[in-house]
Amino acid sequence: MKKYLQMPFSTREYMLSKDFELFYYNDKHITPLKEHSHKYYEFYFFLGGDVSITIKNQTYPLQKGDMVLLPPDIKHYITIHDPDIAYQRFVFWFTPEFAKELHHISEDYVYLLKHSKDNKQYIYHFDTITFNTIQSKLFLISDEIHFDHFGKAVKLSLAVKDLILHLSRVVYEMINPQITKEQHGLFEKVIDYINEHLEEDLSLERLAKMFFANKYHIAHLFKEKYGMPLHQYVIKRRLALCKDALLNNEEITEICLLCGFSDYSSFYRAFKKEYGLSPKQYKSQHFRIDKES
């Protein structure tokens, strides 16, 4: 998985950047740090391994899809139970000063930080689709850090802000599902349902029955809002999730079923039409740099 982005494990416990830092680790047989805390926010995005984390004397086993959020001054340490299994994770740091800057822009940016601090909730688990989307945002940030593309500083700032806001939105909607749904009109409710159930039957007839609405009315809303039929929107959303999963090195045959395609051939045709490459070609092209590293 993107070997060129991997970093050797560092025991550094201070930040070099005034705003944020991101690390991608994939280690075996490392010696974890003893109990410690930081003066900055620390996120773990857990990808794999046989690991648990102890936070303020309470231990949590970690599984793929977990996000750990540690506010400043929260004591914690990692325990590796099987050092032969690769311990894979993203670690994201950012300073309280950077959090204050974001808060000045909008308090929505710091919703998650405030929720974690006020409720002493440090572990959040995401489903596969949600976690793949988060991973794709982390890889985008890593790519920008490692390469000197035009507009790097601006792109990196936007990508980090997008990640932080996205995490706050995801957690808000996990905590307040009923409030979120009640605030939406019919169109927003249908969109939310589609995004949460991409692996299911999302025909116009089924959605009309579920929302007690006229199917022609729903069809008109999609045409008016997006300029395309509902089924085309669904395919595009499924393909976008498939692309995220491919970038995270998931198995191609599993991806198409996870994202709601009935068989591989229909997934293959739709993917090639949308992106101009087969899924295998897209994956090979994206990961070719691994072989060159």
Image (cartoon, helix red, strand yellow):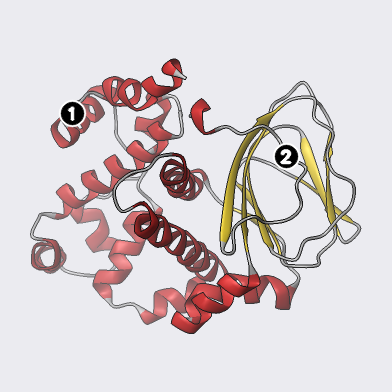
Question: On the image, which quarter does residue 245 sit in?
Answer: top left
User: Do we see residue 281 in this rendering?
Assistant: yes
Question: Amino acid type of disc 1?
Answer: Lys
> What residue lies at 43% left-to-right and 44% top-to-bottom?
136
Up/down of 105 relative to 224, above or below: below
Up/down of 40 relative to 268, above or below: below
User: Do we see residue 1 in this rendering?
Assistant: no
Measured as percent of width and height from the top left, residue 251 is found at 44, 24
> What residue lies at 29% left-to-right and 24% top-to-bottom?
264
Question: Amino acid type of disc 2?
Answer: Ser
| SS for callout 1 | helix
Q: Which residue is mark 2?
A: 10
Up/down of 287 relative to 242, above or below: above
Measure how far apart labels 2 and 1 are at the Cα level. Answer: 41 Å
Towards the viewer: 182 or 157: 157
| SS for callout 2 | loop
Q: Which residue is mark 1?
A: 272
> What residue lies at 16% left-to-right and 55% top-to-bottom?
230
Towards the viewer: 245 or 114: 114
